[in-house]
Amino acid sequence: QVQLVESGGGLVQAGGSLRLSCAASGNILSATTMGWYRQAPGKQRELVATIFSAPNYLDSVKGRFTISRDKNMVYLQMNSLKPEDTAVYYCYARITARTTWSPDDYWGQGTQVTVSS
């Protein structure tokens, strides 16, 4: 069983910062791409940032958000937050489990980020 557990969401004023963390645990053989998606009310889930060999960012967060990784942990430092960043943020990982020996997509439960104006 593989689990992704996020932490670090919350309420912040515009211009403020938050740091999201995600820990992948369980019977993991290997993890390739890890990252963050978000979904605002009434909108589709969108990629915010991913990292494998190099980081990849949504255009609207470039220069404000920084993704980093340490083994099976992935972080998202969010600076200069804007009200339009308000969403549920989901951790994502492409993981090969020892039980399946094939890569699958895993998701965290989501953490709410609310930016007030």
Image (cartoon, grey):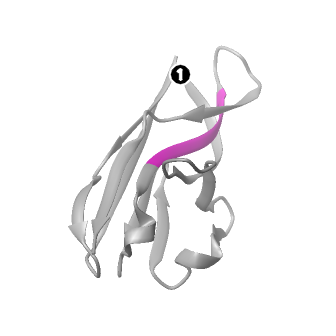
Prevailing secondary structure of the magenta residues: strand
Residue 93 highlighted magenta (yes or no): yes
Residue 100 higher or lower than 29, as above or below: above
In the rendered view, does 91 fall on the left or right side of 18? Answer: right
53 or 105, which is in the foreground? 105
Q: Quadrant of residue 54?
A: bottom right
Please provide percent x and percent y for residue 81.
Answer: 36, 75
- The residue lying at 47 percent from left, 35 percent from top is 108
The residue sitting at the right extreme is 102
Is-magenta flag for residue 91?
yes
Direction bottom: furthest residue: 63
Q: Residue at (55%, 47%) from the top-left corner?
A: 42
- What residue sits 31% from the left and 59% below the top? 114
- The image position of residue 71, as x and y in percent, is 49, 50
Nearer the observer, 108 or 116: 116
**Quarter assignment of residue 16:** bottom left
Q: Which residue is mark 1?
A: 27
Disc 1 secondary structure class: loop
Bounds of the magenta span? 89-96
Q: x, y (%) of residue 112? A: 34, 48
- Residue 14 versus residue 6: which sits nearer the camera? 14
Q: Is residue 72 above or below residue 114?
A: above
Label 1 Cα crowd, 10 Å radius (few <14 / some 14-19 / many 20+): some
Locate residue 86, reporting x and y percent: 40, 60
Q: What residue is at 42 percent from the left and 63 percent from the top?
A: 76
Most foreground residue, 2 or 41 = 41
Amino acid type at circle 1 is Asn
